[in-house]
Amino acid sequence: MKLLTLALGMTIGTSISSAEQGLALVAESPAMSKLSGKTSSGKKQVKAKTKHGKAPAGRPGESAEARNARMKWWREARFGMFIHWGPSVVLDGAYKGKKVPGFSEWIMAKAEIPIAEYKECAKQFNPVKYDPEAWAQIAKNAGMKYMVITAKHHDGFAMFDSAVTDWDVVDATPYGKDLLKPLVEACRKQDVKIGFYYSQSQDWCNGGESRLKKWDPAQKNISNDEYLKTIAVPQVRELLTGYGDLDMLWWDTPGKMVAERAELFNFVPELQPSIIENNRLQRGKVKGDFGTPENEIPDSALGFDWETCMTLNGSWGYKSYDKKWKSSDKVIQNLVGIVSMGGNYLLNVGPTAEGEIPPASVKILDEIGAWMKVNSEAIYGTTTSPFEAPEWGRYIRKGNTLYACVSAWPADGTLSVSSKGFSFTKATLLADPDAAINLEAKGETLTLTGLPEKAPDQSVTVIRLK
Ligand code: JFZ
């Protein structure tokens, strides 16, 4: 693992190339390839993978054309909201008076809470302030085009009314209503795509596997195959038949999911031909439509579709004492860094037991939204440029347009931009479209002069070059 700290102030990790790692798919936007005649990065196609971003194999037998049509909205969207929510948030990251370090949604396993005791949490899980319309609105205001919510996390709790277990929101909580349905409806209404996260193998209460040692004799010792047959397969079927067409299915922790077990879910594309799946269904992360580097920003285009997920503080699930919030500047720089390398950014919020997205998260998202209102044309439907990342920021490209995304604003009002293969005649500051900027082309470089002394945008200032 190579760690680089670039001008953006981001720590970027990648491990490039391993002999066995072929390039299964090239996620290239058709508009991109024409100019360079090369890959979307313009460089030699790198056999690259990040630690967790292995090339996904796609859907067996699907034509490139069908695949491109299916992936279209997702490739254009670039920015989505992840939501980790469930009865674990009732504990607020503490057990028997002691803080439990780590992700709050892992507290049951980390603190080895017996099933019977953990299930008491559900009796206090009563999110009366849950307002799915407001959630969809928060995502939309931030410029997010899709949403993925935990339908079942590793604690096995179903956020919907499952016929195969009582360990679900309808049977086990005072709230007593499906939490997913109104969110799906709200998202559809507001034109936000919606997908479900589903932990298909790990399930601490219903007999699935545990990545940590089992800690309670009440944890059923049924085989993985039995678990999949009695819980995971029927539940995924419930999810795919109860909510109309879903946009995404986000599998997680494929531990014991060998190929034969993953095949049990072959009905997914049959039931929902247009659904998009991540690469965490099968062990080895080979199946699926996109890679899932976690908390990583690759420093080169990967040659396949990928999405980096990240949370706003240090936990996916809510934990009131985790106040390590990322600044909106940081998140914007991450977004720009990810998009410049051809990826999507799935940014997580953890709602409270009452059903509210924490105000601290909403504030960050609002700030991102303000930036997106000015600069989103450099995000949606864009992809990698043919150029290496410059010292001052990142390049993002859309057809013949290049977006210079500047995070280190030049004090002398002058910026050197790579321009090989383009013929730019106009430079525009998205944050100040009327400002006059001079262009001077020399060889493969374009020099911009007369830039304002102070960066017009606090985080990343975008200059559109046409
Ligand atoms: C998993 C979950 O265990 C976690 O609770 C959360 O839902 C997160 C989004 O996904 O955690 C992982 C999964 C994969 C890696 C790291 C954490 N990984 O590949 O490095």
Image: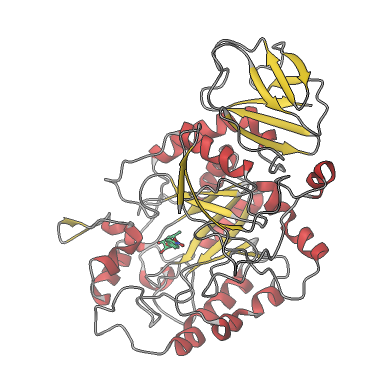
Left or right side of 305 for 281: left
In the picture provided, is 363 more to the left or to the right than 382?
left
Quarter of the view holding residue 267: bottom right
| Relative to 421, residue 189 above or below | below
Is residue 389 rendered to the left or right of residue 199? right
Residue situated in front as seen by the camera: 109 or 162: 109
Q: Quadrant of the C terminus?
A: top right
Q: Is residue 459 shown above or below 189?
A: above
- Residue 113 placed where, x, y %? 23, 71
* Above or below, 216 relative to 441: below
Determine whether, in the image, residue 402 is placed left or right of residue 132: right
Residue 453 is drawn in which quadrant?
top right
- Please say which color scheme the image uses: secondary structure
* Position of residue 39 measured from the top left corner of the image (x, y, whole percent): 75, 50
Asked if residue 363 shows in the view, the reply is yes
Relative depth, front residue between 199 and 254: 254
